[in-house]
Image (cartoon, helix red, strand yellow):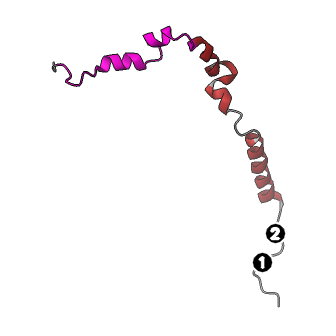
């Protein structure tokens, strides 16, 4: 077993203080006032799911048009052919 750390840094205390369920978090008087920021409609998923509205519909419409163009629209001009 290694001896005491000469810097006085205790890894176990650091991990305990850094965890969200630490003793300090339970003693924080503002914790319950800040909790609403991370729950319900303000959760991480709910904040970012509306970041690009309409992207799904636009992607399906574009893919549908590409399929339509490839299957039904024909190019009758034959660019590059010589017209003698």
For the C terminus, give its image quadrant. bottom right
Determine which residue is flagged by label 1. 79
Residue 50 located left or right of residue 44: right
62 or 78, nearer to the observer: 62
Q: Position of residue 83 (x, y in %)?
A: 82, 87
- Residue at 78% across / 86% down in the picture? 82
Q: Residues within 10 Å of mark 2 (few under 14, many from 20)?
A: few
Determine which residue is flagged by label 2. 75
Where 83 falls versus 17 (above or below)? below
- Residue at 15% across / 19% down in the picture? 3
The quarter of the picture where residue 5 lies is top left
Residue 11 magenta: yes
- Residue at 25% across / 21% down in the picture? 8
Q: Secondary structure at mark 1?
A: loop
59 or 15, nearer to the observer: 15
The quarter of the picture where residue 75 lies is bottom right
Mark 2 vs 1: CB contact within 8 A? yes
Q: Position of residue 32 (x, y in %)?
A: 59, 11
The quarter of the picture where residue 73 lies is bottom right
Q: Position of residue 33 (x, y in %)?
A: 62, 14
Where 10 falls versus 69 (above or below)? above
Magenta-colored span = 4-31
């Amino acid at each position: 077993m290694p001896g005491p750390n000469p810097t006085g840094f205790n890894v176990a205390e650091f991990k305990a203080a850094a965890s969200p369920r630490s003793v300090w978090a339970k003693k924080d008087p503002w914790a319950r006032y800040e909790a609403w920021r991370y729950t319900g409609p303000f959760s991480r998923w709910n904040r970012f799911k509306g970041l690009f509205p309409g992207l799904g519909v636009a992607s399906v419409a574009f893919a549908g048009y590409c399929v339509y163009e490839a299957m039904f629209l024909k190019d009758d001009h034959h660019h590059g052919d010589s017209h003698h």
